[in-house]
Image: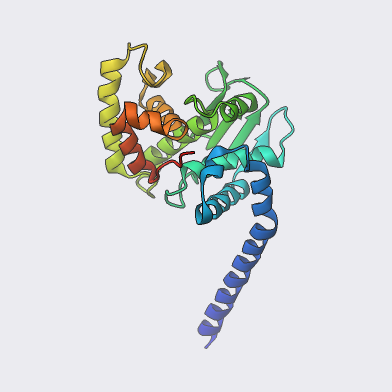
Amino acid sequence: MDVLLGKLLEWLYNQIREAIAEARFRTYYGPLFHRVLHGQYKFYDRLTGENKLHFLRLVRDHYEYFDFIPRKIKLTREMKTIISSAAAQLVLRLPPESLTFWTRIIIYPADYESKITGLRHQGEVNPGLRTIVFGWTGVTRGLHRDEDGLNLLLHEFAHALWLEHKLTSHRYSVLDSYWVREFERLAHDEMQRLQADETHFFRRYAFGNMEEFFAVAVENFFERPVQLESELPQFYQVLQQILRQTPPRG
């Protein structure tokens, strides 16, 4: 009897907690995020119906989960919303564990000197500290030029996903290993064949290593899906499988 009562109380507690969370989402987070994103974040604007609600809930999850740390900049709810939206965009159809390896996001006002490399960076990921870093001016440039294949938020979160897959695949699944291997096979051939091609669809920065190639490919997958599908259809199709989504097109 005590066991049954305990299970009933636990169930009631969970139901109440979920109801409170949903009410808070409907009355606070949902309207807040919509005001920030509408007209400014095209991926969100191009979603429809239930997809919009699912996206906003993922934004809420990342907004609450990450420890946002400002460095010499005033951090606003709008900034946290934009960063959380890029995370939600990448993991829209991925398992719920995706990006949970990372715990902190550091935001600088602009390019900064990396404590790891000693060089100037717009952004980076640090798996040792489970931290993702952004310079805010780089973030805004990516938002304002949303069809040039350059997006700092998508780039660094793509790095984070790739590293998380490599570091945690023995514990939980983030990306499908078969399709990651297929991407690596295609990318290796492309990097060998076209590294010196100044006219390649991907910018030269992509050809430094596999991780950069993936990050640049993800930027183009979301920012220039029509062109990517036309220029490099195999990469487009493999990224569809890896990220389990097809980018909405305006």
Which of the two residues, 30 or 226, is positioned nearer the viewer here?
226
Query: Is residue 103 visible to us here?
Result: no
Residue farthest toward the right in the current orientation of the protein = 74
Q: Is residue 243 above or below residue 234?
A: below
Query: Is residue 231 visible to us here?
Result: yes
Q: Quadrant of residue 18?
A: bottom right
Provide residue 180's location: percent of width, then percent of height: 31, 38
Residue shown at the point (66%, 63%) measured from the top left: 23
> What is the tally of numbered marks visible in this picture?
0
Provide residue 41's location: percent of width, then percent of height: 58, 38
Residue farthest toward the front in the current orientation of the protein = 250
Which of the two residues, 193 or 121, is positioned nearer the viewer here?
193
Residue shown at the point (52%, 19%) measured from the top left: 117
Provide residue 4's location: percent of width, then percent of height: 51, 84
Colour scheme shown: rainbow
Q: Is residue 137 left or right of residue 11?
A: right
Q: Quadrant of residue 189?
A: top left
Q: Is residue 118 above or below residue 163?
A: above
Residue farthest toward the bottom in the current orientation of the protein = 1
Residue shown at the point (50%, 42%) measured from the top left: 89
Provide residue 93's location: percent of width, then percent of height: 43, 49
Q: Quadrant of residue 163?
A: top left
Q: Is residue 157 left or right of residue 13?
A: left
Q: Is residue 231 left or right of residue 21?
A: left
Which of the two residues, 15 or 4, is positioned nearer the viewer here?
15
Residue shown at the point (39%, 21%) measured from the top left: 202
